[in-house]
Image (tube, helix red, strand yellow):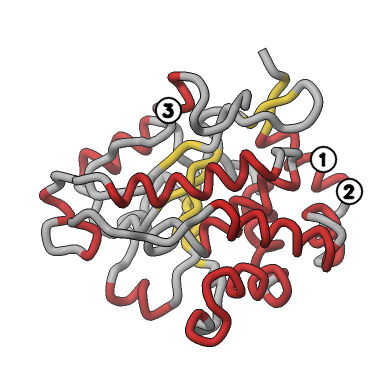
Amino acid sequence: MTGAPSGSSRDRDRHLRVPGTRNLRDVGGYPAGPGRTTRWGTLFRTDALDRLPPSSIDRLVGLGLRSVIDLRWPHELVTSPSVFEGHPSVAYHSVPLLEDDPTPELGLAGVYRHILDHRGAQLVEVVRLLLRPGGVPAVIGCAAGKDRTGVTIALLLATVGVPREVIAEDYALSAHLFARPVVDEHLAVDWRRDPIDVESPPEYMLQALDHLDRAHGGAPELLRVGGVSDAEIAALVDRLTVEAP
């Protein structure tokens, strides 16, 4: 599949091996509607950015990073604050995507539908942050960069026309990255230090995208209901995609 995570060598290199992270990835290079692809170096997804050494911060700033959108709960920000909070040149935004953890009651796949059904205002806020002057390049993340981040990135990719199978494959990459051994002194006392069996089967995301279409009329319509205009959606497409080579 052209542009899928298992495609070209550049697709395989979308994982940024930055010390202090385990799951930092570029979502560029995906097909995004007729004649367009997602822009490289514009939208990133990540696990928590709480353990980056100065060299990693400098590397991300050197890549042009302008904003960080942190989807974690407030208590996570207290115990593991982002290294970009208060950064002089990178805008840091906290957007708690969930009020609590409904996973025990709903299951993981149910949580994804819950976010789409009940956290539309937060998803709209993410879109508006990306559309601000200097809103991109941006990185969106949570603790593992898999669930809260996965749904948010999926909504954005669906809005700009990325096929659902590609979105699901991008989501599933988290399991592969967490299963790999990692040698990173910055994660030595962190839960991410060892290979982890994380749950990110592509069918969970495909089910969420099916629900998005059935219950909300698709990603653009969910955003419209939240107050996002057609002009803003067009601006998001322009920011996140480019004409295909």
First reached walking from the N terminus: tag 2 or tag 3: 3
- In the picture, measured across the screen, residue 131 lies left or right of residue 232, that is left
Tell me where residue 161 sits by quadrant: top right
Q: Are marks 2 and 1 in contact (CB under 8 Å)?
A: yes
Q: Which residue is mark 1?
A: 234
Q: Residue at x 87, y 59 (%)?
A: 217
First reached walking from the N terminus: tag 1 or tag 3: 3
Q: Are marks 1 and 3 in contact (CB under 8 Å)?
A: no
Q: Residue at x 52, y 24 (%)?
A: 7
Kind of residue sitting beneath label 2: Asp
Kind of residue sitting beneath label 1: Ala
Kind of residue sitting beneath label 3: Arg
Nearest the viewer among 150 and 234 is 150
Tell me where residue 228 sits by quadrant: bottom right
Q: How many marks?
A: 3
Q: Is residue 195 above or below residue 133?
A: below
Real-space Cα separation, disc 2 to disc 1, in angstroms: 6 Å
Q: Which residue is mark 2?
A: 230
Q: Is residue 129 above or below residue 102?
A: above
